[in-house]
Image (spheres, helix red, strand yellow):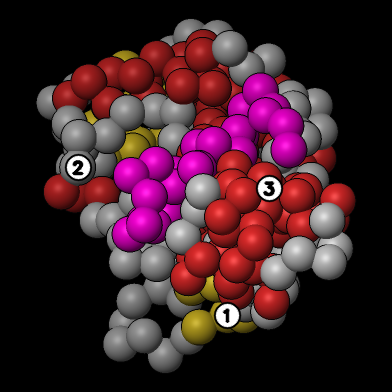
Amino acid sequence: MTTSALISERALARTYNTPSYADPFESVEDYERVMEYASKHPNKGSSAISSQLELPRGRIRPWVDNNSKPDPVRAIEAAREYGWLDCSFGDPELTALNTLVANVFSGGSIAERNYEPSFALNHRGEDSHVFDALELADIDYQVVDDRDGRADEVRPTEHGTVLGRVLAVLGAPVGPKAEQHLSLPDYLSSAPADVRGQFVFAYLENRAVERTGKDTLTIREQRNRDYLESLAELIETVAGDGVTLGERDIIVSADAVRRLGTVR
């Protein structure tokens, strides 16, 4: 198994809690050692392999005898199948993941208990861009409505926890955002202009509010100040100019809105 530039197997494995290992990635390495040895010595059982590799038999027996795999291994295999581990700037897989990361920040969440992501639909409803992102990621989903006045949500139905973990590796917050000190994903600092632009577009489409009689857009977030400063700077970098940060609001000027293109 290899490590990609943006999403490494090691980082993905470390989103798991493996009681038998201080570092969950070691379970991946042990599994690979066991499978390699077993393939070269097909007549040896779990007891012999355990002795040879100095690993507890109770740990490796399910791997050898029942074709079981550690959860981090299954996640890595799924992520590789979707092309997430190999993706880089310019790839459609990264376009989808970048958009979904922006949606976690601006209108979604990743459950702290199991990394299940969910994304609130914006004012466009069934035309929300999150559907395009999930389809580009080749992820099946369902729409959850009738949420007691809250916005409808779209949730992955297959490999959702793996997707949530991949988004977390990219820098999406896990758990309630109001209780965290947020920061923008590190990859944005080295991302090309189109990647930063897509992140900003998704964010504005979810969070920006029009004011009556004005062509400006306003984002109001109850977030830590340095996060708001970074967000305002990112939007201005994409827009070219015309973004200001007040006490609680980020204001995107009418000229900046026109340069960005309509998002409402």
Dot 2 corresponds to which residue?
180
Q: Residue at x 46, y 22 (%)?
A: 186
**Figure check: 14 above or below 70:** above
Mark 2 crowd level (few <14, some 14–19, many ≥20, 10 Å Cα): few
N-terminal of the pair, mark 2 or mark 1, is 1
Q: Tell whether position 68 is magenta.
A: no
Secondary structure, magenta segment, majority class: loop
Q: Position of residue 62 (x, y in %)?
A: 60, 74
Labels 3 & 1 near each other (Cβ < 8 A): no
Mark 3 crowd level (few <14, some 14–19, many ≥20, 10 Å Cα): some
Return the mark for residue 32: 3
* Camera-nearest label, 3 or 1: 3
Amino acid type, mark 2: Gln
Dot 1 corresponds to which residue?
143
Q: What element carries label 2?
A: loop
Q: Can residue 255 be seen in this view?
A: no
Amino acid type, mark 3: Glu
Between the C-alphas of marks 2 and 3, the distance is 36 Å
Q: Which residue is drawn at 62% across and 17% down?
A: 191
The magenta span reads: 1-27
Q: What element carries label 1?
A: strand
Q: Where is residue 235 in the image (x, y as percent from the top left)?
A: 47, 22
Q: What is the quadrant of residue 251 in the picture?
A: top left
**Figure check: 57 above or below 192:** below
Return the mark for residue 158: none
Amino acid type, mark 1: Val
